[in-house]
Image (cartoon, rainbow, N blue to C red):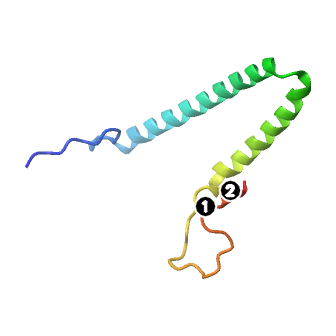
Amino acid sequence: MAASAPTVGAPAPSSSLRTTAVSGVRWTAGASVAQIVLSTVQFAILGRLLSPRDCGPMAMVATIVDFAAVFAGAGLSATVLHKRHTPTKVPLPPGYGNVLV
């Protein structure tokens, strides 16, 4: 029997948990740095394009959106069902927490 080729992007079967964890930390750190840099560039460009009168409301809206993103990233997006059977009347279907935020 011929061995199948590993899937693209999947870790090699012999890679250790430590190697996988370090790779994940690097990707997460890189994404965080990229997000900070892009946000700074975005605000620099908007600061040059907008009048001083328009910068205030833009900063307030950006603060509110960032505050809501903290809640969205803090676990509201991950819906976990603890029971196999849910009651017939559910207040909100799973996943609607993000819509409200």
Which residue lies most toward the top here?
A: 48
In the displayed structure image, the side of residue 10 where residue 36 appears, left or right: right
60 vs 81, nearest the viewer: 60
Q: Which numbered marker is on residue 65?
A: none
In the displayed structure image, the side of residue 4 where residue 10 appears, left or right: right
Q: Quadrant of the C terminus?
A: bottom right
Q: Which numbered marker is on residue 95?
A: 1
Which residue lies most toward the bottom here?
A: 88
95 vs 84, nearest the viewer: 95
In the displayed structure image, the side of residue 41 where residue 53 appears, left or right: right
Q: Amino acid at mark 2?
A: Val
The quarter of the displayed image where residue 81 is located: bottom right
Q: Residue at x 60, y 82 (%)?
A: 88
For residue 47, above or below residue 95? above
69 vs 25, nearest the viewer: 69
Residue 89 place in picture, x, y as percent = 65, 80
Residue 57 place in picture, x, y as percent = 87, 34
78 vs 42, nearest the viewer: 42
Question: Tags 2 and 1 in contact by the CB under 8 Å rule?
Answer: yes
Residue 17 place in picture, x, y as percent = 38, 45
Packing grade of label 1 (10 A; few <14, some 14-19, many >=20) is: few
Identify the element where label 2 is drawn.
helix
For residue 74, above or below residue 55? below
Q: Residue at x 83, y 33 (%)?
A: 59
Residue linked to disc 2: 99
The quarter of the displayed image where residue 43 is located: top right
Residue 77 place in picture, x, y as percent = 61, 55
Identify the element where label 1 is drawn.
loop
Q: Amino acid at mark 1?
A: Gly
**Inter-mark Cα distance, 2 to 1:** 8 Å
